[in-house]
Image (tube, helix red, strand yellow):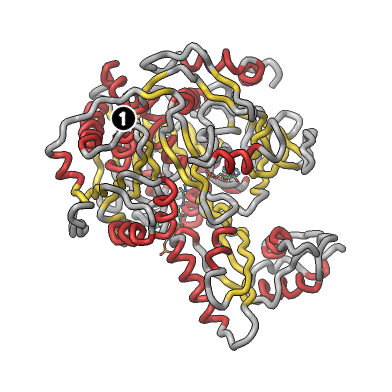
Amino acid sequence: MKNSPYAETYARSISDKAGFWHEQAQRIAWHRAPKTALTPQSDGTATWFPDGELNMSYLCLDWHVQQGRGQQTALIYDSPVTGQVLHYSYAELLEEVGVMAGVFQQNGLQAGDTVIIYMPMIPQAVMAMLACARLGAIHSVVFGGFAPHELAIRINDAKPKMVVSASYGIEVSTKIDYKPLLDAALKEAAHQPERVFIWQRQGAPAVLQAGRDYDLALAMRNAQPAAAVVVPSDHPLYILYTSGTTGKPKGIVRDTGGYAVALHYSMEAVYNMRPGEVFWAASDVGWVVGHSYIVYAPLLFGCTTLLYEGKPVKTPDAAAFWRVIEQHQVKVLFTAPTAIRAIKKEDPAGELLHKHDLSSLRCLYLAGERCDPNTLEWSAEKLQRPVVDHWWQTESGWPMVANPMGIEALTVKPGSASVPVPGYEIQILSEEGRPLIAGQEGLVAVKLPLPPGCLPTLWQDAERFRESYLSTFPGYYMTGDGGFMDEENYVYIMGRVDDVINVSGHRLSTGEMEGLLAEHPLVAESAVIGIADALRGQVPIALVVVKDGGEVDPVALEIELIALIREKIGAVAVFKAALLVKRLPKTRSGKILRKTMRMIADGLHYTVPSTIDDPAILTEIHDALAARKIGQAFLPHHIVS
Ligand code: COA
Ligand code: AMP
């Protein structure tokens, strides 16, 4: 790799951060081009392009129309659940976004105000994001699969002036009414928005509350388009809440200028795209993949983006993805390994895949959760195309480790997401903060300053930002993942070192689930762990200790606890087991040994921690799990003292 195009680019991105990114910044159309690349902050972070001014919606829409891309398709909406396929050209999308922004502006929305967007995968969700960006208003999209309680938490934290939602979403063939969910969230929330705009989808319209709720389509009929409002580079574009270790999600803030430059760079360096080509991120606008690679990056780069309201299977079958690729001439597909596992489960031989002409497809990108080598190899063999596992997180906003296909296609090593992306100085640290050598597993950190596009802070909580990410080892951003690097700087991500789990590529907090279970009157304490799942990567299970006294029906209690998590977090948590145990294994200082329980549940060999209070409890845990056929590979005599 020495002296390779990647090695040279990477070395320069680290040795001359300012020069490297200043050069990249020239490639977007600023209203006021920055003269300074970055201003270092005292905590080691940096503000990128501090004197630049721009507008994200202008960059994604107006600029392309001005450059002659007005008639090119900007957005394809493909919805197998409604049987619709719609195309919006750049000119049409600009028109829609301008008018929607006009509605918001005429209703008092200004730069710096916040807006919650709670919508299914319909074009109006993308338009609402771009309309907020157009006014310099800060959107916070909440994934439609989250329950009212989760939405209420985010409403209370973001304090939106407006909420934008829709009458319903469709999960395969089930209609999910969003408006009652939103109403329930607003009932629970202490903060109330001034206005709620509802996109009424075809069919039974949602009931609107006079004086607060407005029909968005109706309002758009009478509105004038709003012009793009120019904002400083460090102006927040959005807040995206993600799970941390506590019940309170973290409000990741994204700046505008650094993000625009980083996304533009990634479309070429990582995804090897060219303007005019079709890019499909099969995710949801509620996740970071949706923000960055359904909405902002493809449009910034002049590509056609695809918004898919469907599933990899069941809408109608395991050929859904291949049909979309063929029909829309998709060049790059980006999805989660879970989606591929779901397809593989239904069509192991890839017979449905071979019925479609996939000649347009150049490459498949996978991220969002660990990609098991089996899934990577199956996709590469069936597609006969490069498959790139790449690693990043909500906080970074764009890939941190990847095979940089636009710079150089490197050798694939299954199990590794490949090499650090230019700009990211990845370092593996020991528990004491000492840099580790190749092959040694430790904490995955990024040397500060982070490149453009990464989070500058948490929404109105700079202290939590420092405490969560920067305070462990000064000079480093802690990713929360564990892993190692080999001699060729390939990074292997081994999983989270905190209480975050990944269910179908959806990031959830076990700490939050434990907090909710504790609300049940019979629960004394619980431990929620993420156990290996062949389809979803991980699923949560709870080990529950009940309060002393009284008879408890374990089956009835389990049903109630499952319903509690479903009601409070949502069905996406896929929480389906709450096992009663007499005690939880703890250290002598009272810390619950979650990792040890996870290893038992996954049938892995483990060492009994020397700090354990009572090793006999592990046998009880094993028995409880085995009774439910969890962790059967494990045998008690594998315990090593
Ligand atoms: N709104 C409301 N409910 C939702 C939802 C949404 N946006 N998304 C999921 N749900 C519900 C589902 O209906 C399901 O409910 P149920 O328990 O009543 O059946 C539950 O949440 C679990 O959903 P899901 O994990 O999607 O399970 P599934 O069996 O319907 O589908 C997969 C399985 C693998 C097809 C699906 O998880 C998938 O497509 N995964 C890829 C995920 C992905 O792209 N992640 C992006 C991160 S980059
Ligand atoms: P999210 O913030 O929801 O994107 O989740 C980010 C987390 O998902 C990371 O911190 C990792 O734990 C995990 N993750 C994402 N991509 C990968 C990958 N390619 N390999 C392993 N883990 C991944």
Looking at mark 1, is its residue's CB closer than 8 Å to ligand 1? no
**479 with respect to 94 (left or right):** right
Q: Secondary structure at mark 1?
A: helix
Residue 353 visible in image: yes
Please rate how many residues cluster around mark 1, counting C-alpha atoms within 10 Å: few if below 14, some from 14 to 19, many from 20. many
Image quadrant, ligand 2: top right
Q: Residue at x 25, y 37 (%)?
A: 108
Image-quadrant location for residue 69: top left
Q: Which residue is mark 1?
A: 134
Residue 360 visible in image: no
Q: Nearer the viewer, residue 544 or 385?
A: 544
Q: Nearer the viewer, residue 144 or 2?
A: 144
Q: Residue 291: x percent and y percent?
A: 42, 38
The residue most toward the right is 641
Q: Residue at x 34, y 42 (%)?
A: 115
Q: Residue 279: x percent and y percent?
A: 40, 33
Q: Residue 500: x percent and y percent?
A: 59, 52
**584 with respect to 269 (left or right):** right
Q: Residue 407: x percent and y percent?
A: 56, 21
Q: Nearer the viewer, residue 114 or 124?
A: 114
Q: Amino acid at mark 1?
A: Arg
Q: Residue at x 80, y 73 (%)?
A: 616
What is the quadrant of the C terminus in the image?
bottom right
